[in-house]
Image (cartoon, rainbow, N blue to C red):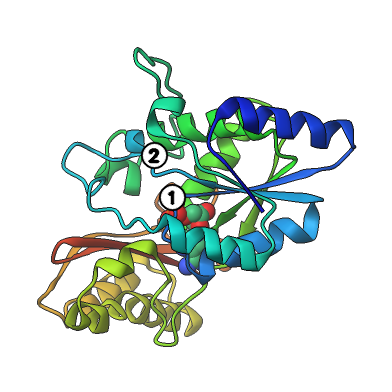
Amino acid sequence: MQVIQSIEDMRAQVRQWQAAGRTIGCVPTMGALHQGHLSLVDLAKAQTDVTVLTLFVNPTQFGPNEDFAKYPRDEAGDLEICRRRGVDVVFAPTNEAIYPKGYSTYLNEEAVSEGLEGGARPGHFRGVCTVLLLLFNIVQPAVAVFGEKDAQQLAVIRKMTRDLRLPVEIVPGPTIREPDGLAMSSRNRNLNPHQRKEAALLYQSLQAGKKLVDSGIVQVERIMAEVHHVLGRSNRLRVNYVSIVDPDTFRPLKRIEPGQSLICVAAWLEQVRLIDNLRV
Ligand code: AMP
């Protein structure tokens, strides 16, 4: 496995692969890797000849009061995990390489990005879209894999690649969970043991919502009330939003469309912000 830091070296490797007719799969990450990330690596490997995992904690997708400085980082551990999983190249550029002094070009998707994470984290998707366009331009993947854990991000990226006619196929991967249902996340590393236990309430709240839907209830207010009710079991949890949306447009639904509705939650567990979602 190669670790590449410079954009020029990455481009040279890409040219070599392209000359040899090899297709490139890309898994963009911010590191502190877990089984969720690795499941995306497996999906990329199954569809393309070579796999590039990008490792870059992207400063432009964090707001001024967010956890950029506290975001978990473990480059040595990440490289070892990638080596064992059969990643071909880890592309780990520096901040200065991606955003040199004077950098001033940003990309806005203006519909799918509007609500939920976009509302709670102004500028977040502008940073996400910008860095992904940069990474796609450098790595030139035929396929890029993204987790359903970040469902709105997946929908925004799909919209952006469609709008800009980017020659990359966006492939989704299912959310990988801990045994108690907690969606794996790099940020889970910042939970203390008490918080870790209560973090499972997010998934439990989604399951409670799904149960109502499965019993035939279609009024979103009733389902949202049930989700809030379960989240209310912890006094450490502060709900950021509960929303039921169309999984492609992320517009809030007035009533459940069976199989085409996504319950989304975001909550603070003291200083750690967690998100999760479930299709119903
Ligand atoms: P991140 O490093 O958090 O930016 O995530 C990198 C990619 O991994 C994104 O496409 C995420 O949606 C995906 N991902 C994160 N957590 C999970 C999970 N538990 N299961 C599946 N994919 C995930």
Residue at the spot of label 2: 58
> What whole-number distance in Å separates the C-alpha atoms at marks 1 and 2?
7 Å
Q: Is mark 1 within 8 Å of ligand 1?
A: yes
Q: Are marks 1 and 2 in contact (CB under 8 Å)?
A: yes
* Residue 37 shown left or right of residue 250 in the figure: right
* Residue 81 shown left or right of residue 88 in the figure: left
Q: Residues within 10 Å of mark 1 (few under 14, many from 20)?
A: some
Residue at the spot of label 1: 30
Q: Is residue 253 visible?
A: no
Camera-side residue of 85 and 41: 85
Identity of the residue drawn at 33% across and 37% down: 59
Which quadrant would the N terminus be assigned to in this image? bottom right
Residue 199, by quadrant, is bottom left
Residue 181, by quadrant, is bottom left
Identity of the residue drawn at 45% across and 64% down: 77
Q: Which label is found at residue 85?
A: none
Image location of residue 205, percent across then percent down: 32, 78
Image location of residue 256, percent across then percent down: 47, 65
